[in-house]
Image (tube, rainbow, N blue to C red):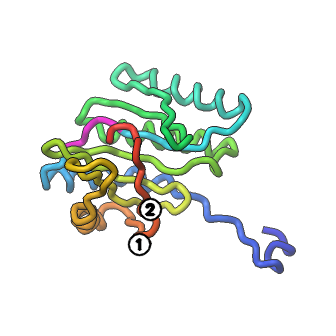
Amino acid sequence: MGFLDGLLGRSKPAKADLDVLFRVPQAALTLQAEGFAFSGRGAVCFRDADGRADDELIASAQEMIRTDPDASVELLHDEFGFTWLEVTRPTGDVSGLVTDLHAVNSTLADHGFDAGLLCSTVVFEQDGRRLALVYLFKRGTFYPFVPDPAAARRRDNPVELQIRALVEGDIPIEADLGRWLAIWGAPGL
């Protein structure tokens, strides 16, 4: 940050701590003890930039993930104009999935596309109910997102609060509930 930026009150946003993603396997064990099983699915959400530079990085990240025969990756677009890179792994491999998500986030961030990174998800399920632990890239925190299986576009807020209480010792939880955004159309949900 330069002198003029400091004088005018401008600041650079804090760099995201992607290493907290590696704490998700511990949260997965906590959730498993409560009956939520890892679904084998996760994704990175970002705003696709115009041009070829990010397309080449995304293709490179996909190829990197595909080197593992147990992993698959797919590029998807949702109804809101966001791009999702969905990774699927065997249901017991939370660590492998988290490593893949970290690699995608790091690749885009290290090449200057961090402004377009929005969130990453790791999906769990219990009796037909889906739960995503959502990592907010710009905040370095997580929150649970639980769609209500009985109604379209409605969240199950009581379950989200219960999940927060369960995993807050495992992962950093976003304290501002206003930032717990609905991610309708996210892969795996």
Residue pictured at 33% horizontal, 36% vertical: 41
Q: Residues within 10 Å of mark 2 (few under 14, many from 20)?
A: many
Query: Residue 40 in magenta?
Result: yes
Of residues 169 and 48, which is closer to you in this image? Answer: 48
Answer yes or no: is residue 25 visible: no
Q: Provide the residue span drawn in magenta.
A: 37-41
Kindly identify which residue carries mark 2.
141
Residue pictured at 44% horizontal, 69% vertical: 178
Residue pictured at 24% horizontal, 42% vertical: 38
Answer yes or no: is residue 46 visible: yes
Of residues 62 and 178, which is closer to you in this image? Answer: 178
Kindly identify which residue carries mark 1.
175
Q: Residues within 10 Å of mark 1 (few under 14, many from 20)?
A: few
Q: Is residue 48 above or below residue 61?
A: below
Labels 1 and 2 touching (C-beta < 8 A): yes
Residue pictured at 26% horizontal, 67% vertical: 161
x and y percent of residue 74 in the render?
45, 27
Asked whether, in this view, residue 109 is left or right of residue 5, the answer is left
x and y percent of residue 57 in the render?
63, 31
SS assignment at label 2: strand
Query: Residue 69 in magenta?
Result: no
- Quadrant containing the C terminus is top left
Of residues 182 and 67, which is closer to you in this image? Answer: 182
Residue found farthest to the front: 151
What is the three-letter code of the residue carrying label 2? Thr
x and y percent of residue 165 in the render?
25, 68
Asked whether, in this view, residue 62 is left or right of residue 108, the answer is left
Name the N-terminal-most of marks 1 and 2. Answer: 2
x and y percent of residue 105 in the render?
54, 43
- Quadrant containing the N terminus is bottom right
